[in-house]
Image: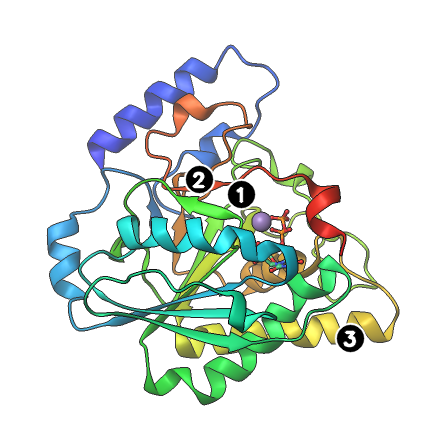
Amino acid sequence: LTEKSIELGHCERKLESNKNIIGRKAALQVLTPWLAPIIWDGIYDLNVLNDQFKDKTIGLFVFAVKKYIRFLGPFLESAERYFMVGHKVRYYVFTDKVAEVQKPKLAEKRVLSLMEVTADQRWQDVSMRRMQVLTNLTREQLPQEIDYLVCADVDMVFGDHVGVEILGDRVATIHPGYFLVEPHSFSYERRQISEAFIPYGHGDFYYMAAFYGGTVEEIYKLSTACQNGIVADKKKNIEAVWQEESHLNKYMAYNKPTKVLSPEYIWDTDLPNGDMIKRKRFLAVHKNHAEIRNR
Ligand code: UDP
Ligand code: MN
């Protein structure tokens, strides 16, 4: 921890001159105010943790619906290289075109379940439907199959080690575009009418819904709360500003994560301050939004 603090302190000093960056101290912590670790390279001992989690099975949940099916191959191939290597892994892939998926060759102790899901017309609804599917999956099937579940966007690739250091009861990742931003500027849902509403002064980090996880039971609670929020909003004919990400942030603001992942665990090479992120472990694939989101 000391070494990491020194290193991060160095980054902090480097930023002193940059007047646009506020709230940098909070962003470079290795411990939250409620004493949850914030995972950066160098703060954990992988050998100790690998042993501690050696009997656990880890699920990786992902949607690849409509045109997003094109991301699935690279996503899975990179997961085979970097995600939970050496551990028991089960992929849960949801798609509208089961027949079109080419299953990659998986390493020992790793299996892939392919499941069918409705293709919603709006991309926002596809993205939000993940909460409904997660609720059913974590209630009925997963308690018998796995211990921890990690939920990811498919338009991503693993670029470096992601292992058991990310496991915990409730785990969320700091959005890479917001780790140097002061809380007042977080893009939380600020309209009171939405279930995802977070008042100014509440909330700790802006988390990105492209990577989060926890025990099966905790993901069940989280997805149920988010799904209920989404349904309640729909009844009022509104949608949270960042869909399920807004509901996830609401949930995490009041049910604090037991572990927080630094932006090493979601990075986008288009973002500034990449030199502060030593290991880019999970990277956004750049996409043409207009092309990929129309049918
Ligand atoms: N998604 C999908 N098909 C779609 C739209 C979304 O499979 O037509 C899934 C996919 O896993 C995607 C996630 O929902 O990664 C979130 O959507 P997107 O990545 O477009 O959101 P962004 O990261 O751009 O906010
Ligand atoms: Mn995405």
Left or right placement of residue 192 versus residue 138 in this view: right
Left or right placement of residue 248 versus residue 27 in this view: right
Mark positioned earlier in the residue sequence (3 or 1) = 1
Estimate the spatial distance between the alpha carbons at disc 2 and disc 3, rounded to whole Å.
31 Å
Q: Label 1 sits on what residue type? A: His
Residue occupying the point 45% across, 25% down: 274
Residue occupying the point 46% across, 50% down: 173
The residue under label 1 is: 175
Q: For the residue labelled by badge 1, is the local secondary structure a helix, a strand or a loop?
A: loop
Residue 20: give x, y in percent of width and height: 61, 19
Residue 87: give x, y in percent of width and height: 20, 64
Quadrant for the C terminus, please. Answer: bottom right
Residue occupying the point 43% across, 86% down: 141
Q: Is residue 179 visible?
A: yes
> Cβ–Cβ below 8 Å for labels 2 and 3?
no
Q: Label 3 sits on what residue type? A: Ala
The residue under label 2 is: 263
> Cβ–Cβ below 8 Å for labels 3 and 1?
no
Q: Which mark is residue 16?
A: none
The residue under label 3 is: 232
Q: For the residue labelled by badge 2, is the local secondary structure a helix, a strand or a loop?
A: helix
Mark positioned earlier in the residue sequence (2 or 1) = 1
Disc 1 residue crowd, few under 14, some 14–19, many 20+, Cα 10 Å: many
Q: Is residue 34 visible?
A: no
